[in-house]
Amino acid sequence: MPGKALTPDQLLHVAERFKALAEPSRLDILQALKAGERNVGEILEKTGLGQANASKHLRVLHAAGFVERRKEGVSTYYRLADNDVFKLCELMCGRLEKEAHTRKKLFA
């Protein structure tokens, strides 16, 4: 929505999505899912998180619309809803690189 002011309700929804990403463990889960769909056990193995912790983070990511899930028997599989979240990560990493470069020049 470039150039258009967001309503308070829209701002709330945007802030909720950013809050879901403001946890390193959730970003780690998203990275683990970048390679494709994984069951909970595979996510635990890839991230090193405990069962309860991973489940909590997966619920948040699902509620925020970043991941989708499906049941197959007793297993639950998760996949990225889309790859757009990584565009946000790339923007932030680019910003951090610029800041680091500026600091390096400042203290050189």
Image (cartoon, helix red, strand yellow):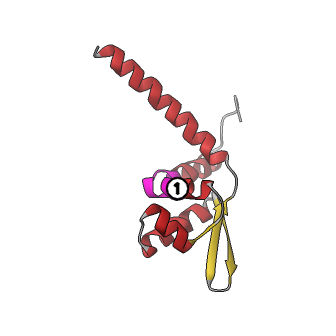
Residue 100 in the image, given as x and y percentages of width and height: 39, 26
Residue located 65% across and 64% down the image: 37
Q: Amino acid at mark 1?
A: Ala
Question: In the picture, which quadrant includes the N terminus?
Answer: top right
Residue 3 in the image, given as x and y percentages of width and height: 69, 28
Left or right for 86, reference 70: left
Per the image, the residue denoted by label 1 is 20
Left or right for 36, reference 53: right
| Residue 52 figure quarter | bottom left
What is the secondary structure assignment of the residue under circle 1? helix
Question: In the picture, which quadrant includes the C terminus?
Answer: top left
Residue located 49% across and 55% down the image: 28
- Residues in magenta? 19-29
Residue located 68% across and 79% down the image: 71
Foreground residue, 49 or 8? 49
Q: Residue furthest left?
A: 107
Residue 76 in the image, given as x and y percentages of width and height: 62, 76
Q: Is residue 20 magenta?
A: yes
Q: Main secondary structure of the magenta part?
A: helix
Left or right for 57, reference 106: right
Residue 70 in the image, given as x and y percentages of width and height: 69, 74
Foreground residue, 108 or 15? 108
Residue located 60% across and 58% down the image: 33
Q: Is residue 107 magenta?
A: no
Left or right for 47, reference 82: left
Note whether 34 is above or below 100 in the view shown.
Answer: below
